[in-house]
Image: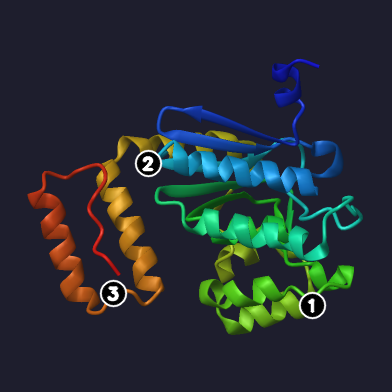
Amino acid sequence: MTAATAAASAPVRVAHDGPVTTVTFAAPERANALTYAAMQQFIAGLRAAHEQDSLLLVIRAEGDDFCVGRDQKEKPAGVTRAQSLGLILEANALLRGFPGISVSVIRGRALGFGSGIAVQSDLTLAADTATLGFDEIRHGLAPLVVAEYLPGLVGHRATADLIYTGRDVTADEALRIGLVSRIVPEPDLEDEARRLCAGLVASEHGALRLMKSYSTRLRAGAVADPQVSAIAELDAWLTAGRPGHPDVPAG
């Protein structure tokens, strides 16, 4: 098998096109359930987006489903349970720490880790037929990692309902509780995603990066005086001539 053939058959593919890195789940025959190897490839794709200094990180999938989470039946040889679970933390940190704008495009089922990707992306576009949910409890697992980050994104009540029941959530409800950013008719999903990304690329890149940095630090409680800091950082960026990579205050 040639390198090109191996890359084409990989369960996760990565492509760079100017300021956009696209990571595609490409194992539709298993509903894009992520094996240990696929998780490693996903992490490599996230790292590549950081290293390429991409403005956009787009996460999409082939087939009828986005991702039904980790492959619960796999037991990779020579890998401890802690090592396997640790990949989730690594992927989450890379996704949340991406300095550009992350965009997930959801069709079909996005369950478990798949829903984690959806809710942790900056923008998530979902088909009106999509189904989301944190179904770990239905597999006999306790989603402790989800319990750490989800309340800050959708609130404690919604988190409790999702992680204790493991129930499926329709696209409409996912939008209402904040798991996704917007929903569109399923046939229009790819076109709408392209329009969204094209609009972002056509925007002021430095403004997007500054907004992402400030929002991230604000949520982390790292901005001492938000109103004063907002004016100071915006003024500094404009004075510097709107650089594509704004200076970010330390701390």
Q: What's the residue at 87%, 51% (across, down)? A: 76
In the rendered image, which quarter contains the C terminus?
bottom left
Task: Name the residue tied to disc 1.
Answer: 165
The quadrant in which residue 203 appears is top left
> Which mark, residue 200?
2
In the rendered image, which quarter contains the N terminus?
top right
What amino acid is at disc 3? Answer: Val
Local crowd size for mark 3, using a 10 Å CA cut-off: few (<14), some (14–19), many (≥20): some
Left or right of 249 in this view: 137: right
* Location of residue 213 with respect to 42 vertically, above or below: below
Left or right of 201 in this view: 25: right
Q: What's the residue at 76%, 55% (across, down)? A: 69
Local crowd size for mark 1, using a 10 Å CA cut-off: few (<14), some (14–19), many (≥20): some
- The earlier-in-sequence mark between 2 and 3 is 2
Q: How far apart in space, not on screen, are marks 1 and 3 (Cα)? A: 36 Å
* Location of residue 176 with respect to 30 vertically, above or below: below
Callout 1 touching callout 3 (CB < 8 Å):
no
What amino acid is at disc 2? Answer: Leu
- Residue most extreme to the left: 239
Task: Name the residue tied to disc 3.
Answer: 223
Which percent across, then down, holds residue 141?
83, 72
